[in-house]
Image: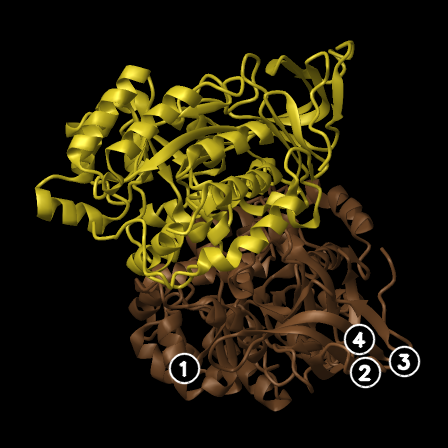
Chain colours: A yellow, B brown
Amino acid sequence: MGKALRSPSGRLLVSGCDVLRVPLTGDCEILREQDITVADGVIESVAPSGVTSSFDGAEVIDGRGLLATPGLVNAHTHSPMVLMRGAAEDVSVEAWFNQRVWPIESNLTADDVALGARLACAEMIGSGVTTFADHYFFPERIAEAVTESGLRADIAPTYFSSRGQEALESSVAFAEGWHGRADGRVTVSLGPHAPYTVDDEDLRTLADHARRLGLRMHIHAAENVEQTESSLRRRGVTPVQVLHETGVLDAGALIAHGCGIGEGDLPLLAAHAERTAVACCPKVYLKHALSPLTPVRALLGAGVTVAVGTDGAAGHNTLDVWEALRLVALTQKQAVGDATWMNVSDTLRLATRGGARALGLGDVVGALEPGMRADIALVDLSGPHCRPLHDERAALVYSVRASDVRTVIVDGRVLMRDRNVLTVDVPAVLAEIDERVGRLLDISHGKAVQHYDP
Amino acid sequence: MGKALRSPSGRLLVSGCDVLRVPLTGDCEILREQDITVADGVIESVAPSGVTSSFDGAEVIDGRGLLATPGLVNAHTHSPMVLMRGAAEDVSVEAWFNQRVWPIESNLTADDVALGARLACAEMIGSGVTTFADHYFFPERIAEAVTESGLRADIAPTYFSSRGQEALESSVAFAEGWHGRADGRVTVSLGPHAPYTVDDEDLRTLADHARRLGLRMHIHAAENVEQTESSLRRRGVTPVQVLHETGVLDAGALIAHGCGIGEGDLPLLAAHAERTAVACCPKVYLKHALSPLTPVRALLGAGVTVAVGTDGAAGHNTLDVWEALRLVALTQKQAVGDATWMNVSDTLRLATRGGARALGLGDVVGALEPGMRADIALVDLSGPHCRPLHDERAALVYSVRASDVRTVIVDGRVLMRDRNVLTVDVPAVLAEIDERVGRLLDISHGKAVQHYDP
């Protein structure tokens, strides 16, 4: 672990880099040989190199030969689940929950979560993710890890109705205590797990708290079409209708997955489009043999924000948003049978501006423009697998590897420089985790945090 | 560029590595802390570390902390198409061929192909691919690049009937001249492009030559279901039936893609299963919005060998077989609606033993066992994105990045050591390619090597 850099002057100059411009609509562009100046965590200017050479007292990052992209946004994950990476393979959704993940999660301690979150932060910094939307237990420990790591995160404390009133109240207390902390890098959403694990009364109560506190909700809903069918069969309404009737959409919801969102749900989502988004995490849908996928074209057509997520690493195996955005492009083209759809610019937009909007941060991050917080990934496209470099956007979507990210900046602070993560002591974290693995995976006790029967 | 190492004694010891054992059927296993000894390019032993410490005069590779896997096999590519990486994005199959790739290919010179092949070899060495099945123009120049690079390849000279008799004869001459050269590392297949670009008479002639020379064929067929439908409409037979009737299956065929292979084709393929295989390259199918995909479950059920390919980088953007095998697992699970299918062991087997069998090299490479040629990738699974390491097989299929491959050995010769490619001067190749890009992509002439109308 080195030292995370923030210049004493609060000024940073990234010099001579190319810049990926991600407009609100239309094609992304490459601005050649730019200087990016940052003061107090905010981008002051993006201008042709040399114009701002008198940016005195600034920490300087030599960006020549690198492409600056907005830091990626991981719009849905359960970061501490890196602890279970590779421990639940080749199983159905039901077996994944009931035979692997929920039994293993009954072993989790607060210290496990703290370590898992720190490893997850290191992995995300190492792959150019600067913001993530988390949903998990022991959220204080995640918030501490985020604070230390220098990342930006929206953290939702996972709540099941089976956990009872005290757990609900502690969710709310976490929100009251943590929202806006770490210089605003930590925000909180309320996190009822799903309409099939949280009853309507609790959804209403949490939605009321969210409105009172000015927060949003982060919830799994219509994860697959079977859940939608089951909800219709058991209750006569879709999961999205449940979110509507309980006030969740009104509070504002980041919906994870939504593969089971139907035509009839679109008007409800569209009516709340300002504060509603859907996070698409295709690797886990394919891995769990789900079909159909998130109806991205229909959602965007209805004006609903779509973002890219990895879900937890117990399903996705990585927290690599480059991998996730590539799969969004590939699977969405196939899903609608149109190779011209979800083009490279639109794909990059989903993983940057889309993710930022999904977390309520659309004016804060997601693009490299004056006034935005300085969340920047410097990517090296000079490797053989990206060459010749006919189109940087295509290289970012279809060729790049997470290991091509050289340097990562959040809020003007350098979190990784030349692939050295500066804010997480990775060897120490890994050593501590390795000691815990045996206990964590021992599910001979037969317990589980919940039972999957949507 | 460093120096490719082959010990003067012809002996190599990879010491202390874990070894991925890929059996013919059943689960892959991890053998802990093994020594692999190699003499004259052949694996002599794989045994617990220390037992063979007196392997005198051997070049030693310290494998501690690394996992030795069989080198991956890229069972279908057009290696020089790395020159067009990222130059044909977000277009339909038809536009990809007719507006981008086939016009660009009319600009290709032999020197372009030589450079493209060298870059492709560097990329594949860098990602742990040790054998590839190529299909392209100017095959001599590819064979020279393979010879120099130290890789193993089966090279098929691409032939269209529109190129005429002389081109056909030069295909055969290439086969006669090159098959078995470079110490056996270069083999040749005959390469009629597809049943829709090569007429039946030429297919018969080439199949006759293949039988005479003891070679196989490498051909695109039933690339998508539309091609099968078109063939049935125009000719009353499927593409696979054409391969049967013209003797291509009898000669032995590596069929690229086969997404349009139907139930009725399976008995024909099964009858020639000893010398017939299908290469599945899912990234390009998704990117071109194709559905259905290669019917892998039906093919394997019929006893037909299935292997993993990247296709050319004008479609796939990388030659990364880790990426390709991951997508085979993900897409095949979804395609058959069964998350327990195409498990991690079966997926790894397709990309190693399956690929070897598909190229007629099933007794030569594809597993790390005494008597096999020593084609080895040493992979580092210690990065945060692979940890904790509950299951190496899952890490290889779902977490690993090409950049985690540290050292690559082919035929007992070290081609990459600690990520330094020793046999290709990558900076020089890239500099030469960059100078050619403008001319290569200029398609204002309106020419094309072929027209796509299957």
**Label 3 near label 4: C-beta < 8 Å?**
no
Q: Tell which tag, 4 or 2, sits nearer the viewer.
A: 4
The residue beneath circle 4 is: B13
Residue pictured at 33% horizontal, 29% vertical:
A170
Circle 2 packing at 10 Å, graded few (<14), some (14-19), many (20+), is some
The residue beneath circle 3 is: B9
Q: Position of residue A210 (x, y in %)?
A: 29, 21
Residues flagged by tags 1 and 2 on a common chain: yes
Of the numbered discs 4 and 1, the one sitting upstream in the chain is 4
**Label 3 near label 1: C-beta < 8 Å?**
no
Separation of disc 4 and disc 2 at Cα?
12 Å
Left or right, residue A58 beside residue A250: right
Residue pictured at 43% horizontal, 56% vertical:
B285
Separation of disc 4 and disc 1 at Cα?
41 Å
- Marker disc for residue B269: 1
**Label 2 near label 4: C-beta < 8 Å?**
no
Task: Determine the chain carrying the residue at label 4.
Answer: B
Residues flagged by tags 4 and 1 on a common chain: yes
Residue pictured at 62% horizontal, 85% vertical:
B363
Q: Tell which tag, 4 or 1, sits nearer the viewer.
A: 4
